[in-house]
Amino acid sequence: MTIPELPQTPGTDPAAGPGHAAPAGAPVLDDGTYPALRTPTGRGALMLDGSWHQISPRYVSAEVLLRLILLVVIAVGAYAATTFLAQPWPWSWALAGVIAIGILVELIILPRQARAIGYMLRADDIVFRRGILWQRMIAVPYGRMQLVDITRGPVDRAFGIAKLKLVTAAATTGVEIPGMTEDAAEALRDTLIDVAEMRRTGL
């Protein structure tokens, strides 16, 4: 059995860089994504043959905005604790500072993490991978999928991205692919639903 083809779009060619036209029939999964997946190069690197698809760079912008909002909330909370609750200011601001440093470190490595997120459509399953130092690679058989869900928060909608969630009978094998363009998420959802239905019916 072959996997149903995803909707095609002229789009742009990620390999050629911004502004370059993609070949006719280029899949929407690669429209507006990073040009090259960052992969581990160490001795224990996890590699698979096939074609990797990536997420949109707008995912980084959305995550940066969310963390900046969180920093503002932390600063307001620390100010309120010292001003209105009469808490000792060193403790309140020290705790806020530690949390803020953690968020700033996360912001620094966020672009690198985003470039390491990818997914591959194979004949029998979809493979998801993320991480450089702490690698995670998980394969979800099409026939085991029970639900394919798309979620969009307010910030995601503002940046035109979505999160695709694959739910299986085993909770540990669930997959969430963040930062997909809305067109790619919808196209992948429809394709996975079709393939999963065919696998369950034995076609």
Image: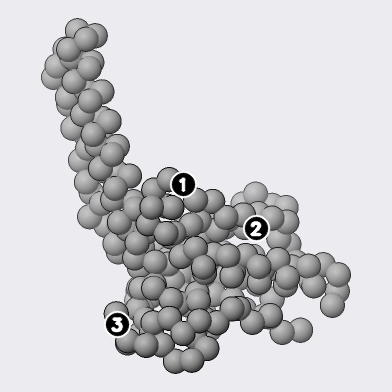
Q: Amino acid at mark 1?
A: Gly
- What residue sits right under mark 3 in the picture? 19
Which amino acid type corresponds to the residue marked 3 in the rendered image? Gly
Q: What is the quadrant of residue 194 in the picture?
A: bottom right
Say which of 78 and 171 sits in front.
Answer: 78
Depicted 46 relative to depicted 167: above or below: below
Upstream in the sequence, badge 2 or badge 3? 3
Q: Which residue in the structure is indicated by mark 2?
A: 148
Q: Is 99 situated left or right of 117 in this image?
A: left
Q: CA–CA distance between discs 2 and 3?
A: 32 Å
In terms of image quadrants, where is residue 199? bottom right
For image coordinates 23% across by 49% down, the residue present is 105
Residue reaching furthest to the left: 90
Distance between the alpha carbons at the discs numbered 2 and 1: 17 Å
Between 172 and 52, the residue placed more toward the observer is 52
- SS type, badge 1: loop
Q: Nearer the viewer, residue 115 or 194?
A: 194
Picture disc at residue 153: 1
Q: Residue furthest top?
A: 86
